[in-house]
Image (tube, coloured by chain):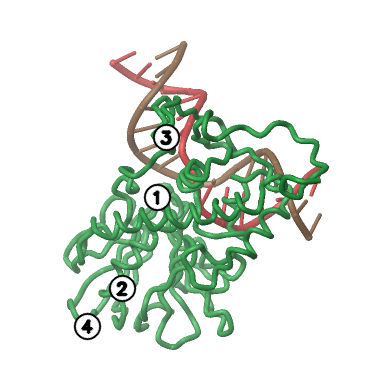
Chain colours: A green, B brown, C red
DNA sequence: CGTGGCCCCTGATTGC
DNA sequence: TGCAATCAGGGGCCAC
């Protein structure tokens, strides 16, 4: 469930320790922890050992640490339950630790980066860095995220309205906009007063703009909370502690009153998960006769 | 080719 | 009380 803000907190937490650090040893305790590394655990261990790490980067929910040689990056995807923990060299692995990467750090001496992942949807990999795009190959297919300077709101609005799907599905489509998961999708839709099942083609341009602004705002708010809740070292370099849950206004609040209008929020099954929304503020669009998709006129 | 649905996985929770 | 079914969901993959 780590989405963009949680992954960014992990990145911020890792940065001071890993930048400039040399990898002193790599131990893959469970091969599933390097599922994304096609060449397998032994190759992963061999090629990462002795590498010098650079400044961690992020796009959407993908995190990567470029190696000093400039051609490869240590790619991290947390999946649903992944954590990247900085621990001392003496601390033993926690339960569900899949990979341990020993580090000689310039500032803090010997440390270890532990990749812990209960449900094993996450994975590490060594991935070639595309010199043109400056992102790892496995990240090349996703769109920029809303917090990148490169993100183009106007282009997003156009692309969103060209889709033939519903708006929540589109928000979760990482090739359209990256970094949004189920939680922040529900939060942004609530904020913009848009029903999750609204067809993208019937969304007005102004409403679509409002929606992406809301996405950004919700993420920045979460980031501001998360950024203050972790300590420099060892600590919650994981973003797991409640997912900044104090700020949630829709997700998981079914049965509770809407903070805007007081109506009882509902939860609906959606894509094998849940959609949480206010049935009064976020009106389900009437079954439209899809003939007029230009804003209101026609 | 775009869209939607399935499945990967494990632990907590729910239900019988 | 104990065991099984259910739920959580990011993203790759595949069928339509």
For the residues labelled 3 and 2, say whether their Cβ atoms are less than 8 Å apart: no
Mark 2 or 1: the one toward you: 2
Using the numbered discs, state the Cα–Cα distance from disc 3 to disc 2 in whole angstroms: 39 Å
Mark 4 or 2: the one toward you: 2
Which mark is on residue A260?
A: 3
Determine the secondary structure under disc 1: loop
Q: How crowded is mark 1: few (under 14 residues within 10 Å), some or many (20 or more)?
A: some
Using the numbered discs, state the Cα–Cα distance from disc 4 to disc 1 in whole angstroms: 30 Å
Residue shown at 44% from the left, 58% from the top = A4
Q: Where is residue C3 in the image (x, y as percent from the top left)?
A: 41, 22
Q: How crowded is mark 4: few (under 14 residues within 10 Å), some or many (20 or more)?
A: some
The answer to whether dots 4 and 1 both sit on one chain is yes
Which mark is on residue A81?
A: 1
Query: Relative to A75, is B2 on the left or the right?
Result: right
Residue shown at 21% from the left, 59% from the top = A92
Q: State the residue position of label 2.
A: A15
The answer to whether dots 3 and 2 both sit on one chain is yes
Q: Position of residue A125 (x, y in %)?
A: 47, 68
- Residue farthest toward the bottom in the current orientation of the protein: A69
Q: Where is residue A10 in the image (x, y as percent from the top left)?
A: 34, 62
Which mark is on residue A106?
A: 4
Determine the secondary structure under disc 2: helix
Choose the circle earlier in sequence order: 2 or 1: 2
Residue shown at 30% from the left, 43% from the top = A246
């Amino acid at each position: 469930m780590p989405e963009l803000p949680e992954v960014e907190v992990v990145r911020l937490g890792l940065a001071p320790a890993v930048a400039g650090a040399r990898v002193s040893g790599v131990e893959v305790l469970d091969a599933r922890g390097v599922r994304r590394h096609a060449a397998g655990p032994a190759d992963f261990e061999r090629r990462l050992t002795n590498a010098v790490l650079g400044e961690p980067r992020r796009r959407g929910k993908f995190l990567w640490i470029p190696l000093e040689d400039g051609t490869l990056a240590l790619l991290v995807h947390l999946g649903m339950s992944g954590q990247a923990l900085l621990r001392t060299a003496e601390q033993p692995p926690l339960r569900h630790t899949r990979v341990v990467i020993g580090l000689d750090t310039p500032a803090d001496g010997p440390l270890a980066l532990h990749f812990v992942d209960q449900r094993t949807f996450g994975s590490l990999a060594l991935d070639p860095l595309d010199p043109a795009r400056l992102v790892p190959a496995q990240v090349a297919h996703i769109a920029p995220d809303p917090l990148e300077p490169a993100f183009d709101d106007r282009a997003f609005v156009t692309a969103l309205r060209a889709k033939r799907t519903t708006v929540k599905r589109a928000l979760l489509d990482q090739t359209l906009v990256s970094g949004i998961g189920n939680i922040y999708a529900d939060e942004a839709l609530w904020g913009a007063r848009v029903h999750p099942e609204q067809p993208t083609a019937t969304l007005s341009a102004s409403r679509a703009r409002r929606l992406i602004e809301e996405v950004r705002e919700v993420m920045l708010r979460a980031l501001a909370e998360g950024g203050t809740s972790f300590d420099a070292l060892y600590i919650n370099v994981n973003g797991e502690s409640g997912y900044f849950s104090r700020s949630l206004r829709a997700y998981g609040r079914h049965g509770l009153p809407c903070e805007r209008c007081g109506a009882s929020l509902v939860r609906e099954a959606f894509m094998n998960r849940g959609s949480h929304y206010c049935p009064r503020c976020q009106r389900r669009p009437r079954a439209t006769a899809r003939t007029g998709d230009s804003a209101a006129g026609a």
